[in-house]
Image (tube, rainbow, N blue to C red):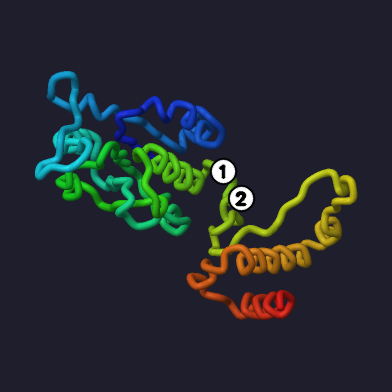
Amino acid sequence: MKIDIITIFPEFFDAFLATSIIKRGIEDGFLDIQTHQLREYSSLKHQRIDDTPYGGGAGMLMMFPPFYEAIHTLKRNGTKVIMLSPQGRVFDQKKATELSSENHLILLCGHYEGIDARVESLIDEELSIGNYVLTGGEIPAMIVTDAVSRLVPGVIHEESSETDSLQQGWLKYPQYTKPEEYKGYKVPDILLSGHHEQIASWRKEQSIQRTFNKRPDLMEAIKLSQEELKILKKVNQTTK
């Protein structure tokens, strides 16, 4: 997958792209992630990219021409252009999974008071990471890039991504590692039993119970199987 990020702060991404899973994905050839300095696409003196808004108002607005030039330079057949904006659809795991099947993404990072509205004619989608306002689109772009990249085949083990929280709608079951006991805090016996079917059943129940207790808002979007309905009924009974 190729991801191009248009920003006035490309240095913001240096550590992000040189660390952990993202770094390995790039080195192994599964990811091609590039940042692009928006100012390089400005034809104005001192590579200016902002000005005061028509009609008045506080702050500075990012100008349309630099984004137009950057998008048209980087875009190719099949490219999806996304603007990070608090006005967009809230980004979630379902959207991350959907975007991971794309070949090329261009992410636009706004700043100041936002971007000239004419840019909306050049984008395919607006995405928000939550109902709050940040100083710029760089952090949202990192979040989208990270969430999408780890789902690209080859970047991490497929089994690992499939069992992540929210991947199937549920929160992930609790996990434990060595030692088996520390100062009275023990690993559940079931995980030491070696009975894989029983462990899988326990994990499924724990996953549903965690979602029910911690994030009941997620339950509305999950289409429950008969097995999950039985587990949920059991969870309801034990929490009363």
On screen, residue 39 versus residue 9, left or right, reads left
Q: CA distance from mark 2 to mark 1?
A: 7 Å
Residue 230 in which image quadrant: bottom right
Q: Are marks 2 and 1 in contact (CB under 8 Å)?
A: yes
On the image, numbered disc 2 is attached to which residue? 160
Disc 1 crowd rating (10 Å Cα; few below 14, some 14-19, many 20+) is some
Q: What secondary structure is found at the residue carrying circle 2? A: helix
Q: Is residue 112 above or below residue 87?
A: above
Mark 2: few, some, or many residues within 10 Å (few <14, many ≥20)? few
As shown in the figure, which amino acid type bears the numbered disc 1? Answer: Ile
Q: Which mark is residue 156?
A: 1
Task: Report whether 122 appears left or right of 162.
Answer: left
Image coords of residue 168 (percent x, y) = 55, 63
Residue at 23 percent across and 48 percent down: it is 123
Secondary structure of the residue carrying numbered label 1: loop
Residue at image position (32%, 41%) is 107
